[in-house]
Image (spheres, rainbow, N blue to C red):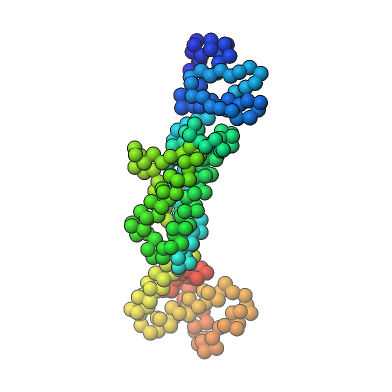
Amino acid sequence: MGRSLTVRVMEMLGFRHVPDKMVQVIERNGRFHRTSTRTFVRHWPFIESFGPQVKTGLHMIEHTCKNVLCHDGVLHNITVSAKVFFDVEKVHPAFMPIVVQLPDTIVKSRVQSIVDMTLREEVAQVESTQLLLPKVIQQINEAIKQRLTKDLKNFGCVLPSDFIEDTLYIKEILPPDRLHETRVEATNISETVEHLADLPQDEIRQAIFTHFYRDMGTKPLQVRAMNVPDALKPDEAEPDKKFPVLRQPTGRVYDN
């Protein structure tokens, strides 16, 4: 949509049009001087100049904190989603010259920094086995909200909790890859034991040798020569490769 006649006329008279939800920055001698929310803004010639127009409104920020340490030493990756309302006119004067230059970047980085710091402080007091409990998650949420409310005030940001319910919430808590592998390994071992318990002794022996040769087949010749049992019978030297009892090893995790 083109500019209206009123806007064109006002710009010819030296005014600048300020769209809705925008704030005009006025600079004096190349430095920040003031802001204006009027629809049409004019500056003093030769002394002042128009700076950037800064958008006021809701910012939706998502941040993943990696390797968050629990009280028992277990690491987790935790994703937090937050919504903050930014108003440049409420920024503390000491921060205003910096914020008006890169408002989106500064607001995002400040929120992420506070969330990361608070999350690590809170999770460090919790055992990994308790981290997924609803009351623990709620406690961490409240701690982050309180810190954001306190520390974002000077940057013109508030949490719109009064009219938005999901202002801040923990979106995802993922254990480290090694912990996941350990759980998979424990499940596979349990299933293997249950399967072997129903087999005759000869088939259990055959299963163990099949698994052994599968594992040794990936090792260098010297390692295989040092580890192949001397007590093997000639007919056990080439076990049935189709015997599907023990799962093929991939590192420490067994997987078919």
Q: Residue at x 66, y 18 (%)?
A: 46
Viewer-closest of 214 and 84: 84
Place of residue 248 in the rendered image (x, y in percent of width and height, measured from the top left): 48, 70
Q: Residue at x 44, y 37 (%)?
A: 85
Q: Is residue 169 left or right of residue 251?
A: left
Place of residue 44 in the rendered image (x, y in percent of width and height, measured from the top left): 61, 18
Q: Quadrant of residue 122?
A: bottom left
Viewer-closest of 4 and 213: 4
Most extreme residue toward the front is 93
Q: Is residue 42 left or right of residue 70?
A: right
Q: Quadrant of the C terminus?
A: bottom left
Total tally of numbered discs in the picture: 0
In this rendering, does residue 175 appear at all? no
Viewer-closest of 193 and 1: 1
Most extreme residue toward the bottom is 231
Q: Residue at x 46, y 39 (%)?
A: 157
Q: Is residue 131 above or below residue 155?
A: below
Q: Is residue 18 above or below residue 128?
A: above
Q: Residue at x 60, y 82 (%)?
A: 225
Q: Is residue 76 above or below residue 92?
A: below
In this rendering, does residue 125 appear at all? yes
Viewer-closest of 229 and 86: 86
Q: Is residue 89 left or right of residue 220?
A: left
Place of residue 7 in the rendered image (x, y in percent of width and height, measured from the top left): 51, 14
Place of residue 228 in the rendered image (x, y in percent of width and height, measured from the top left): 56, 83
Q: Is residue 211 above or below residue 136?
A: below
